[in-house]
Image (spheres, grey):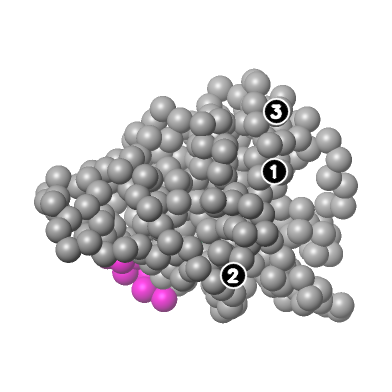
Amino acid sequence: MSIESRKIDHLRLAAELPQSMASGFDDVMFVHRTFPEVSFAEISLQTNVAGTFFSAPFWINAMTGGSEPSAQVNRDLAIAARELGLAMAVGSQRAALRDDSLRESYTVVRKENPGGIVIANLSAAATIDDVLRAVDMLDAQYIQLHANAPQELVMPEGDRNFKGILKGVETIIRHCPVPVIIKEVGFGMCRETYRQLTEIGARIVDVSGRGGTNFIAIENQRRSEWPMDDLRLWGQTTVVSLLEAEGFQNQLTFLASGGVRNPLDCIKCLALGAQGVGLAGFILRTYRSSGLQGLIDCLQHWLHEVRVIMTMLGCRTLQELNAIPVWIRGETADWCEVRNID
Ligand code: FNR
């Protein structure tokens, strides 16, 4: 199975499979106050991720590249990012590092958006050499290193050995010229992972939790026999992953993704301490169903509604939103009790 045909399968299955699981966002509640005492006009959506200002608190997360259909998708997503001032990550660039003819399916993102924030992407098992080439390919401001052990293990042709990855990530962090974001792919993170990451000098994580795109379900569809359906609920939700960050906020910048369905979910991530929110499956499905202009209109509406909710909450800035109290119920509250999270 070539990387190219796997990428095509992923795009198709991620768009087609239902978002079946509880993402935890419905367990997070705000208390409405009658007098917000702010004006819609003074709301700022700006966020600072390790020293660079993003004009919007959400972005297009890593999805694709490395095949002909994905070149078209990346071009259109880059146009949407440019039109709305959103940052955008590409999918894993491994394919282009192996085969020069696939570079354009990634570089099109920088070509369409020369002044924008573009985020490179490789596996956490990559070498520093590969990382330097991937950043250079896109003139990227950041690189995401994705860790996806469950996906690899369920994928028939996936990796089986995960030894030494943290050591490699430590080397990359030390030598990479741009900030490194350590990222999950929809299985979430926990405090034990945050501790390991702080020990190797990591500064930024994208918790990318369970509840949206589910790579165990996707890889199960691609297996010809013995699907591992019992693993479909594996991992922590995005909400739980952010709650697990308690005690690490001074050492790590937390970014959220995984199962974000609407502007309210996005606001909930920010209220739980995230500095920004990545959208993948939602973007792909909207693009598939409504095309480029439909996606731009939808995300334009998101920018508006995020401001609406911030006004209702009386928060002028993301810093104020980060500090607002939230109430947690249901399975997420049970998790907090078991794990002793305040
Ligand atoms: C992804 N994701 C991903 N992540 C990554 O770091 N490198 C990659 O190459 C890919 N590839 C990829 C392909 C497709 C089609 C999708 C939908 C997703 C994972 C993505 O960035 C994100 O972490 C998860 O999808 C969870 O977010 P959503 O989809 O629930 O919003």
The stretch in magenta equals 289-298
- The tag on residue 331 is 2
Q: What residue type is labelled 2?
A: Glu
Q: How far apart are marks 2 and 3 (CA)?
A: 32 Å
In this rendering, which labeled residue sits more in front, label 2 or label 3?
A: 2
- Residue 75 forms part of the magenta stretch: no
Residue 177 at x, y = what percent? 56, 22
Q: How many C-alpha atoms fall within 10 Å of the one at disc 3: few (<14), some, or many (≥20)?
A: some
Based on the displayed image, in which of its 4 quarters is residue 32 positioned? bottom left
Q: Which of 22 and 154 is in front in this view?
A: 22
Q: How many C-alpha atoms fall within 10 Å of the one at disc 2: few (<14), some, or many (≥20)?
A: few
* Residue that appears at 33% across and 40% down: 319
Name the residue that disc number 1 marks.
193
Q: Name the side, left or right, on which 176 lies relative to 99.
A: left
Q: Can residue 248 be seen in this view?
A: yes
Q: How many C-alpha atoms fall within 10 Å of the one at disc 1: few (<14), some, or many (≥20)?
A: few
Residue 240 at x, y = what percent? 58, 57
Q: How many labels does the image show?
A: 3
Name the residue that disc number 3 marks.
200
Q: Which amino acid does label 3 sit on?
A: Ile
Q: Earlier in the sequence, mark 2 or mark 3?
A: 3
Based on the displayed image, in which of its 4 quarters is residue 313 positioned? bottom left
- Residue 291 forms part of the magenta stretch: yes
